[in-house]
Amino acid sequence: MTAILDRLDQVSVFGPSSLALFLILGLDWVFSGVHAYEEWRGEEAPLWRVFGAVVGLWLPNWLGFLLFTLALTLLPIAVGALGAVIGARISDTLVSHWGLYVLGYRPNPGLKSTPLYVLEAAFILLTFWKGLLLSPHAAIWGFACGAGLFILVLPLLRAWRAIAPSWRRAPWVRWQPLPAWTKD
């Protein structure tokens, strides 16, 4: 534990505080949990069905839960790089939620909790700038990888649609209600 707190002292404004460490980790898990739950439960359909509707691809619930609720939530955290977490939070907010909302794809499960992600990204930038500056190349690569996770979701789903004819559906028309097939 001493080594972890020494590292926290080097990379953050908190010094070697175990309380700060547990609060930061706890808030990250709470924010991630709230957001993942909101995406999973959706107002009309879970997020994987909404994203699938944008490109015209039906995903089975087990696969959507695995990829969207588990993998996209845990990968940025599992990497353990602050840049990756920041990139993931910002691109998830901008691409997955605000961008689709502005384009007329509504409802958008997870939209309501995106301010938590913006707050978390800003908090990490403001409090861990020392660590990010210790290795700026790693921070930039981490940011790019974290952002890439969410930027690539729709293009990968489009590619998947091309190779999975039995899962193809009519794409969602912007500004129209969510297609009925998303609720199966």
Image (cartoon, rainbow, N blue to C red):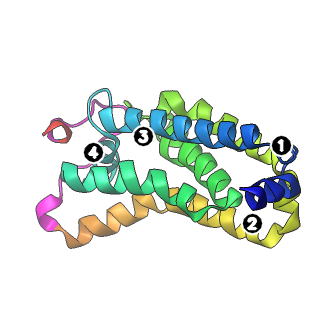
Report the amino acid beneath label 4.
Arg
Q: Quadrant of the N terminus?
A: bottom right
Is 168 on the left or on the right of 130, as rendered?
left
Magenta region: 165-181
Could you say which quadrant of the image residue 81 lies in?
A: bottom right
- The 10 Å Cα crowd at callout 4, few under 14, some 14 to 19, many 20 or more, is many
Q: Earlier in the sequence, mark 3 or mark 4?
A: 3
Determine whether 139 is above or below 175 in the image: below
| Inter-mark Cα distance, 1 to 4 | 35 Å
Q: Tell me the SS state at disc 4.
A: helix
Q: Mark 2 — residue?
A: 140
Q: CA distance from mark 2 to mark 1?
A: 16 Å
Disc 2 residue type? Ile
Give the residue number, with chain letter if any, for mark 1: 126
Q: Earlier in the sequence, mark 2 or mark 4?
A: 4
The residue sitting at 77% across, 57% down in the picture is 2
Q: Nearer the viewer, mark 2 or mark 4?
A: 2
Separation of residues labelled 2 and 4 (CA atoms) = 32 Å
Q: Are marks 2 and 1 in contact (CB under 8 Å)?
A: no
Which residue has dot 3 on it? 36
How many numbered circles are shown?
4
What mark, if any, has residue 49 been given in the picture?
A: 4
Disc number lying in front (3 or 4): 3
In this view of the protein, which residue sits in the foreground, 13 or 178? 13
**Residue in front for this viewpoint, 14 or 147:** 14
Tell me where residue 109 appears, x and y as whole percent: 39, 34
Q: Where does residue 57 sit, x and y in percent of width and height?
A: 24, 55
Spot occupied by residue 158 in the image (x, y as percentages of width and height) = 33, 63
Q: Is residue 59 visible?
A: no
From this viewpoint, is residue 38 visible? yes
Between the residue at mark 2 and the residue at mark 3, the CA separation in whole angstroms equals 25 Å
